[in-house]
Image (cartoon, helix red, strand yellow):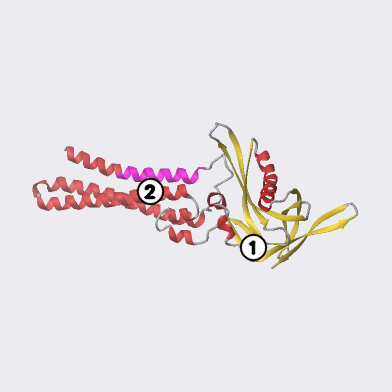
Amino acid sequence: MVNLLITKMKGKFFIRYALLMCVILIAVSTTTAADRSGSKPQWVSKGEEILNSQRSNNTYYFKAIQTVGESLQQAREARITALSEHISQRNKITGKSINDMGLRQNNGVSEEYETFQMVFKNDFESVVFQAQIVDEWWEFVTNKNGRSEYVYYTLFAVSDHGGETIFDRFDVTRSYGAAPAFMSIIPGVGQLYKGQKGKGIAMLCGAAAGAGAIIFCENQRASYVAKMQEQPKHAQTYKTRADNYETARNVAIGVTGALVVWSVIDAAVAPGVTRIKVRKGETLRVKPAAFVQPNGLAFGTSLCYTF
């Protein structure tokens, strides 16, 4: 009687564990953090260097600038100063920044762009660096000192050495195509590919728990079926136990199968973390220009969009 109670508790434990994993998955997939602007983009978690290999030319590079502030607006406004300091230190030249905004044409459709001119002067020359905002993301954190502040991340495309700059086309997207759906035949793999680590790990754990429950219950069922033949006088008791484990196995199969289906559908339709796609061949050519005037130098920019 005691052994029967123990085996029933084992079976219920695995079923409840698998169901608990599903509940955790629901919580992970539906909870949205209120202290950040969505999921952390790929370029924040992995660094901007993953994008530099996608450039079609070396006239520019990607640079992620991180700024902090007591308010979101304060952290956001500090990014241009931080970018100017980065360019100044990288090129060992001093200067000031000028903001320039406008419109460009893309297949007949007007599209707003924002280009920052960084005009640097020293005793020998004046150099104009160009920078475009590619993407932005922020979070509200508490540091080691217990102080809470906003951390603002901005991804820029920046002129490499000043002069003419040919920017590629940058698309900010959360789409990953059909590949994650095929990967998610193993639950969680597609989610990990799309940068959803919490959801992906939870699905993998849920699948592992389900597979473990299936194997355990089937082994127990087979063991009791064998005992029915070995000990006919206890056949009815062993048959009851075998039936219980068969039911538990079927429940585990159903839960795990549902998890697989859910994983595939989620990988196919749910957006992943933000990533940047660099389009080669469609470029915005930015060429700084300097004009001599009676009261000094004037700086301008010429734009040429190439399809």
Q: What range of the chain is rendered magenta?
A: 14-31
Q: Which residue type carries mark 2?
A: Cys
Instruction: Give the main secondary structure of the magenta stretch.
Output: helix
x then y, percent, for residue 305: 72, 64
- Say which residue label 2 marks: 205
The numbered dot on residue 86 is: none
Disc 2 and disc 1 in contact, CB within 8 angstroms: no
- Say which residue label 1 marks: 58
The residue at the point 50 percent across, 54 percent down is 194
Residue 15 showing in the rendered view:
yes
The residue at the point 40 percent across, 58 percent down is 185
- Label 2: how many residues lie within 10 Å, few (<14), some (14-19) or many (20+)? some
Q: Quadrant of the N terminus?
A: top left
x then y, percent, for residue 289: 79, 59
Residue 113 showing in the rendered view:
no
Mark 2: which secondary structure? helix
